[in-house]
Image (cartoon, rainbow, N blue to C red):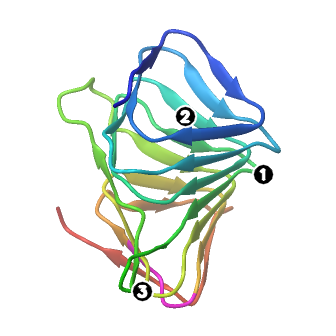
Amino acid sequence: HGGELAGVDLVVTEFFTWTAGTQSGPGFTELASGASGQIREIGDKILAGRAFRNVGTLSWIDGDIRVGGAGIVNLSGGIINLNPTVESVGAFTGPGVMTILPGYGVIDPVIDNLGRIVVGEFGSTARISIGIKNSGIIQLLPLSDLNLVGGLQQTADGSVTGEGTIHFIAD
Protein backbone atom coordinates (compact mmCIF):
# COMPACT_ATOMS: atom_id res chain seq x y z
CA HIS A 1 0.00 0.00 0.00
CA GLY A 2 0.94 3.63 -0.27
CA GLY A 3 2.18 5.89 -2.96
CA GLU A 4 4.38 8.94 -3.17
CA LEU A 5 3.55 12.61 -2.80
CA ALA A 6 6.36 14.74 -4.22
CA GLY A 7 7.06 18.15 -5.62
CA VAL A 8 3.90 20.14 -4.95
CA ASP A 9 2.88 21.94 -1.79
CA LEU A 10 -0.27 20.41 -0.32
CA VAL A 11 -2.59 22.25 2.08
CA VAL A 12 -5.29 20.09 3.67
CA THR A 13 -8.31 22.16 4.69
CA GLU A 14 -10.70 19.46 5.93
CA PHE A 15 -9.55 15.89 6.75
CA PHE A 16 -6.35 13.92 6.14
CA THR A 17 -5.47 10.28 6.85
CA TRP A 18 -1.96 8.95 6.29
CA THR A 19 -1.91 5.15 6.36
CA ALA A 20 1.18 4.47 4.21
CA GLY A 21 3.42 6.01 1.59
CA THR A 22 6.20 8.50 1.11
CA GLN A 23 6.09 12.29 1.18
CA SER A 24 9.32 13.46 -0.44
CA GLY A 25 11.24 16.21 -2.17
CA PRO A 26 11.04 19.94 -1.71
CA GLY A 27 7.87 21.56 -0.51
CA PHE A 28 5.54 20.90 2.37
CA THR A 29 2.33 19.24 3.46
CA GLU A 30 0.25 21.44 5.76
CA LEU A 31 -2.74 20.60 7.91
CA ALA A 32 -4.54 23.99 7.95
CA SER A 33 -6.24 25.64 10.89
CA GLY A 34 -9.59 23.94 11.55
CA ALA A 35 -8.56 20.78 9.67
CA SER A 36 -7.95 17.43 11.31
CA GLY A 37 -5.77 14.51 10.39
CA GLN A 38 -4.79 11.02 11.45
CA ILE A 39 -1.60 9.00 11.15
CA ARG A 40 -2.62 5.36 11.49
CA GLU A 41 -2.18 1.75 10.33
CA ILE A 42 1.01 -0.30 10.07
CA GLY A 43 2.03 0.70 6.53
CA ASP A 44 5.40 2.40 6.00
CA LYS A 45 5.12 6.17 6.43
CA ILE A 46 8.19 8.09 5.26
CA LEU A 47 8.75 11.85 5.35
CA ALA A 48 11.88 12.33 3.21
CA GLY A 49 13.14 15.86 2.56
CA ARG A 50 9.67 17.36 2.87
CA ALA A 51 8.30 19.42 5.76
CA PHE A 52 5.04 18.55 7.48
CA ARG A 53 3.41 21.65 8.99
CA ASN A 54 0.51 21.43 11.40
CA VAL A 55 -1.87 24.25 12.30
CA GLY A 56 -4.88 21.95 12.80
CA THR A 57 -5.34 18.89 15.00
CA LEU A 58 -3.19 15.88 14.07
CA SER A 59 -3.72 12.56 15.88
CA TRP A 60 -0.96 9.97 15.63
CA ILE A 61 -2.92 6.82 16.46
CA ASP A 62 -0.61 3.99 15.47
CA GLY A 63 2.11 2.93 13.06
CA ASP A 64 5.71 4.05 12.70
CA ILE A 65 7.04 7.13 10.92
CA ARG A 66 10.54 7.57 9.48
CA VAL A 67 11.74 11.15 8.98
CA GLY A 68 14.80 12.33 7.06
CA GLY A 69 16.14 15.59 5.72
CA ALA A 70 13.17 17.62 6.92
CA GLY A 71 10.96 17.79 9.94
CA ILE A 72 7.61 18.35 11.50
CA VAL A 73 6.60 21.88 12.46
CA ASN A 74 3.71 22.16 14.88
CA LEU A 75 2.77 25.82 14.40
CA SER A 76 1.02 28.10 16.86
CA GLY A 77 -2.55 26.85 17.26
CA GLY A 78 -1.60 23.35 16.09
CA ILE A 79 -2.21 20.29 18.26
CA ILE A 80 -0.48 16.93 17.90
CA ASN A 81 -2.22 14.19 19.88
CA LEU A 82 -0.13 11.12 20.64
CA ASN A 83 -3.18 8.96 21.22
CA PRO A 84 -3.38 5.55 22.81
CA THR A 85 -5.15 2.76 20.98
CA VAL A 86 -7.16 0.02 22.64
CA GLU A 87 -5.89 -3.48 21.92
CA SER A 88 -8.23 -6.48 21.85
CA VAL A 89 -7.26 -7.38 25.42
CA GLY A 90 -8.10 -3.89 26.67
CA ALA A 91 -4.49 -2.72 27.08
CA PHE A 92 -3.43 0.69 25.81
CA THR A 93 -0.38 1.13 23.61
CA GLY A 94 1.34 4.15 22.18
CA PRO A 95 1.10 5.42 18.65
CA GLY A 96 4.28 3.86 17.30
CA VAL A 97 7.88 4.95 16.88
CA MET A 98 9.18 8.06 15.12
CA THR A 99 12.74 7.51 13.91
CA ILE A 100 15.36 9.12 11.68
CA LEU A 101 15.38 7.88 8.10
CA PRO A 102 19.03 6.80 7.69
CA GLY A 103 21.15 8.05 4.82
CA TYR A 104 18.79 10.82 3.73
CA GLY A 105 20.40 14.24 3.59
CA VAL A 106 22.70 15.88 6.09
CA ILE A 107 20.06 17.67 8.16
CA ASP A 108 18.94 15.91 11.29
CA PRO A 109 15.16 16.11 11.38
CA VAL A 110 13.45 17.80 14.29
CA ILE A 111 9.93 18.37 15.58
CA ASP A 112 9.64 22.14 16.00
CA ASN A 113 6.77 22.62 18.44
CA LEU A 114 5.20 26.07 18.63
CA GLY A 115 1.73 24.70 19.45
CA ARG A 116 0.77 21.83 21.74
CA ILE A 117 1.77 18.16 21.84
CA VAL A 118 -0.53 16.01 23.97
CA VAL A 119 0.66 12.58 25.14
CA GLY A 120 -2.30 10.24 25.77
CA GLU A 121 -3.26 8.70 29.06
CA PHE A 122 -4.10 5.25 30.44
CA GLY A 123 -0.51 4.08 30.45
CA SER A 124 0.20 4.94 26.82
CA THR A 125 3.79 5.31 25.68
CA ALA A 126 5.20 7.29 22.77
CA ARG A 127 8.81 6.93 21.62
CA ILE A 128 10.33 9.71 19.53
CA SER A 129 13.87 9.23 18.26
CA ILE A 130 14.26 12.62 16.59
CA GLY A 131 14.88 15.83 18.52
CA ILE A 132 12.12 18.11 19.73
CA LYS A 133 12.59 21.89 19.89
CA ASN A 134 9.83 23.02 22.23
CA SER A 135 8.61 26.62 22.17
CA GLY A 136 5.02 25.55 22.86
CA ILE A 137 3.44 23.15 25.33
CA ILE A 138 4.06 19.44 25.83
CA GLN A 139 1.14 18.13 27.91
CA LEU A 140 1.55 14.74 29.58
CA LEU A 141 -1.82 13.28 30.57
CA PRO A 142 -2.02 10.98 33.64
CA LEU A 143 -0.12 7.67 33.39
CA SER A 144 1.50 8.58 30.04
CA ASP A 145 5.17 8.05 29.18
CA LEU A 146 7.10 10.01 26.56
CA ASN A 147 10.39 8.31 25.67
CA LEU A 148 12.78 10.76 24.01
CA VAL A 149 15.85 9.36 22.29
CA GLY A 150 16.59 12.46 20.18
CA GLY A 151 16.48 14.85 23.12
CA LEU A 152 14.48 17.92 24.02
CA GLN A 153 15.58 21.49 23.43
CA GLN A 154 13.42 23.62 25.69
CA THR A 155 13.15 27.34 24.89
CA ALA A 156 12.19 30.10 27.34
CA ASP A 157 8.67 30.14 25.84
CA GLY A 158 8.16 26.38 26.04
CA SER A 159 6.66 24.35 28.86
CA VAL A 160 6.13 20.74 29.86
CA THR A 161 3.06 20.13 32.02
CA GLY A 162 0.93 17.31 33.36
CA GLU A 163 1.10 14.13 35.39
CA GLY A 164 2.89 11.87 32.92
CA THR A 165 6.61 11.10 32.70
CA ILE A 166 9.35 11.97 30.21
CA HIS A 167 12.23 9.51 29.92
CA PHE A 168 15.47 10.58 28.22
CA ILE A 169 16.97 7.47 26.63
CA ALA A 170 20.53 7.13 25.39
CA ASP A 171 20.72 5.82 21.82
* Residue identified by numbered label 1: 77
Question: Mark 3 or 2 closer to N-term?
Answer: 2
Please say whether residue 46 is one of the residues in the magenta stretch.
no
Going by the numbered disc 3, the residue's amino acid type is Gly
- Residues tagged 3 and 2 counted as in contact (Cβ below 8 A): no
Label 3: element kind = loop
- Report the residue at 57% width, 10% height from top: 8
Question: Mark 3 or 1 closer to N-term?
Answer: 1
Give x and y (percent) for residue 6.
46, 13
Give x and y (percent) for residue 95.
42, 63
Q: Which residues are magenta?
A: 142-146
Label 2: element kind = strand
In this picture, is 162 found above or below 86?
below
- Report the residue at 28% width, 62% height from top: 149
- Residues tagged 3 and 1 counted as in contact (Cβ below 8 A): no
- Residue occupying the far front of the picture: 88
Going by the numbered disc 2, the residue's amino acid type is Phe
Checking the image for residue 52, the label placed there is 2
Give x and y (percent) for residue 113.
59, 52
- Report the residue at 46% width, 55% height from top: 132
Residue 160 location, quadrant: bottom right
